[in-house]
Amino acid sequence: MMPFHFVECPSPNHDARPDGAAIDMLVLHYTGMKTSDEALARLTDPKAKVSAHYTIDRGGCVYRHVPEERRAWHAGVSFWAGEKNVNGRSIGIELVNPGHEFGYQPFAERQIAALIELCHGILARHAISPHRVLGHSDVAPARKTDPGELFPWPLLAADGIGLWPKPAAPMGAFAARLSEFGYGVPPHVECSLKCVITAFQRHFRPSCIDGVADAQCAAILAGLLAG
């Protein structure tokens, strides 16, 4: 396992977690800014009112912004498995990448290696199940597309971080099954079902992101629920 370079880069943008809230979610993001310096400046700017617990640059350097026991402000308006205060229960990691707005690109090998090592440490400290290792777009599909279709979810799953499905025979209505897995669906969230399906595809079927719940999507979701 490749050791990562760790840098303290504190952000003032955090507060106490809700009383009794367990840390049981891990949310992965991309920075969506042109440079690493711009991203770090924003995440530590008190006027921006955003932060994450960690940022990883393309060279594999890990910046720590917020102690894990504190609530970082990374997910915003979000929903997963009935929980609307995702920040209160999660750890957020930003990966430096210009994102869809500024020239989305594959994540760097050293960056993902550092992410895997960091995640292993987080999962050892907190009881986070594989189906609660998520992308920002999973918990906020109406607003976000990160970490996007180029993120190597299968690689992480092979290392015990998150899920990657083995398709199975589909059962039941797709929207109900999405909700069973954890996605917010109408009327519980102000977002169209197509938007939620698109977020599901961006994570679990990135080869075709069209917002249509076809047979392949149904089989993938069934595999996730079976696992």
Image: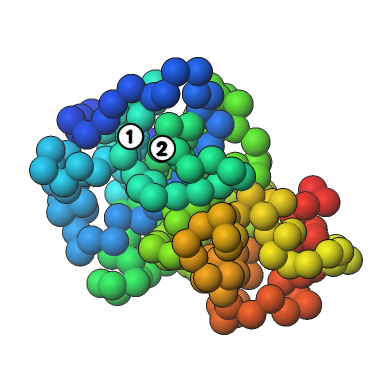
Which image quadrant for residue 202? bottom right
137 lies above or below 68 = below
Residue 90 shows in this picture: yes
User: Along the line of sight, which residue is nearer the eye, 199 or 109?
Assistant: 199
Tell me the amino acid under the disc marked 1: Ala
Helix, strand or loop status at disc 2 = helix
The reply to whether the C-beta atoms of the residues labelled 2 and 1 are less than 8 Å apart is: yes
Question: Horizontally, is 128 left or right of 66 in the view?
Answer: right
Q: Say which residue label 2 marks.
A: 87
Residue under the image location 50 percent in, 18 percent down = 20
67, 157: nearer the viewer: 67
Q: Residues within 10 Å of mark 2 (few under 14, many from 20)?
A: many
Element at badge 1?
A: strand
Q: Earlier in the sequence, mark 2 or mark 1?
A: 1
**Mark 1 Cα-neighbour bin, 10 Å: few <14, some 14–19, many ≥20:** many
CA–CA distance in space, label 2 to label 1: 6 Å
At x 40%, y 62%, the residue is 144
Question: Which x, y percent locates residue 55?
Answer: 31, 43
- The circle on residue 72 is 1
Residue type for callout 2: Asn
